[in-house]
Image (spheres, rainbow, N blue to C red):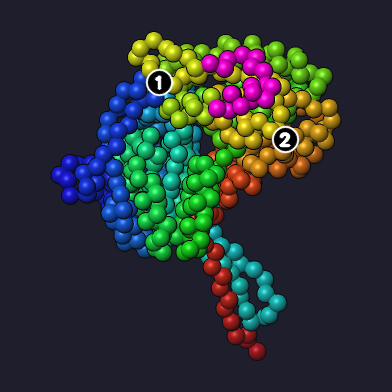
Amino acid sequence: MSERAGEIFIGGEWRAAADGGTLAVRDPATLEMLGEVSDGGATEAGAAVDAAVKAFPSWAESPADRRAAALFRLAEKLEHESTRFQLLLVRESGKPAREAMGEVASSVAFLRWNAEEIRRTHGRTMGSAFRDLRLWTIRQPVGVAAIITPWNYPLNTLCRKLGPALAAGCTVLLKPAPETPLSTIELARLASASGFPRGVINLVPTSRAAEVAGCWLADRRVRKIAFTGSTKVGKSLFRDAAATLKRVSLELGGHAPAIVFEDADLDLAVESIVASRFRHAGQTCICVQRVIAAESIKADLTSRLVERIARLRVGNGTDPEVEVGPLIHEGALQRVRDHLDDAVAQGARILTGGQQLHLAPPNLGTFFEPTLLDGVNQQMRVMSEETFGPVLTIGHFQTEEEAIQLANATDYGLAAYIFTKDAARIHRLVEWLHFGSIGINDTRIIHPALPFGGIGESGIGRENGAEGINEYLETKAAVLRVPTIS
């Protein structure tokens, strides 16, 4: 093993990769190398499982208050270091500073909520049809949980999974995205000083995702996989997890519609849609990708969107005035170009934006103008695939039934948004739209107490709320015969 201290955290010890490998982390805005971290492989993945298995019995049996106290301490430490984590998120992911601060604050909230919720997680007693039988259930942690997180919200998605897993009594294996491992490494450093026993939290940064994940998927001792990322990768994990019948939670892709009715507050709709679509340069799974407007207000809404989108300031997220940062890498830029070229070739019109931006040094990353497309149809890639970039489309409808049909014309079912003042219509659409989360006159849909997850190609299982902790708990039933007194 290399003598380098390293960023792999196993069994309470920091280490380097056995083969000495490292991976480079770059700032997507400047392309500057932020540093090199240890690049783990199968050796480290297996050692992490060994450590998690060893630590599991005592952690699972520890009182809920002890687990809660450790989570509260971690949340407090993260909140205390919020400014440092904010800058770290800006530098490794490229998002604007105000978004990064929001990510840190929400991560603290997820940790705290789960620390509180574990005290409310308990079994039940039930009545029996027989006088001499007593029926009840208990809840126990599923076991070792592997948590695989994406690059776009590296801290938020981690805490949404880590919080309930640790609260439930699971020990964990962490694999951050290779583009953004720094915030996960730093959170693990905070956790190591928060009272979690050795082996409860184990971290393997890696550029060899298939090798590390494959080790965990094949190991019967790993009982849970929690993943946020693309639908393609999620399906592969789901197939491989079936071999050992692991529990699986998958938060996958999205293609969110925003339906704007004729009675909507258009100022509110425009601000909400633009904030959602262009957050993190459109690199979020729940952001609005397509606007479906009532025909009578489409022209007005379109002109308002064009004006607001054109005013968005693009640049390095360290600038507090910047609203849209860079795309994560060249591959993301190419996907945006491909979607736009395909749409324009089929008759779509670019109303604003549509070009790569070349900023002054040191900002040499992949920046792209916020873009609005009109004249779209269902055959275009931008209408059926996640663009994961700063491109918004607008179409129209004539009837409520047509609006529902257009919104549901996707294999994805993660998030949808409605803008209307009609209470009866709100209830109808919440029932008829095939999406796991629906925002009404707002696009802020993820909250610690509210379950979040997808339908169809958007995933399996739920995060947050009581449902989120349930994903890490098994329910065990007990039947006791109690002789009656004659």
Q: Identify which residue, 182 or 197, lies in the foreground.
A: 182
Rendered image: mark on residue 91: none
Residue that carries the numbered disc 2 in the rendered image: 407
**Marks 1 and 2, the one that precedes in the sequence:** 1
Q: Amino acid at mark 1?
A: Gly
User: Residue 316's x, y, as percent?
Assistant: 42, 17
Q: Identify which residue, 136 or 268, lies in the foreground.
A: 268
Q: Are marks 1 and 2 in contact (CB under 8 Å)?
A: no
Kindly indicate the quadrant of the structure image that contains residue 189: top left
Q: Residue drawn 54% across and 54% down?
A: 470
Reply yes or no: does residue 262 show up in magenta: no
Q: Is residue 346 above or below residue 412?
A: above
Q: Residues within 10 Å of mark 1 (few under 14, many from 20)?
A: many
- Span of residues in magenta: 338-355
Q: Is residue 221 above or below residue 323?
A: below
Residue that carries the numbered disc 1 in the rendered image: 365
Q: Is residue 130 found left or right of 166 in the rendered image?
A: right
Q: Identify which residue, 396 or 68, lies in the foreground.
A: 396
User: Residue 54's x, y, as percent?
Assistant: 31, 61
Q: Which image quadrant: the C terminus?
A: bottom right
Q: Is residue 366 found left or right of 386 in the rendered image?
A: left
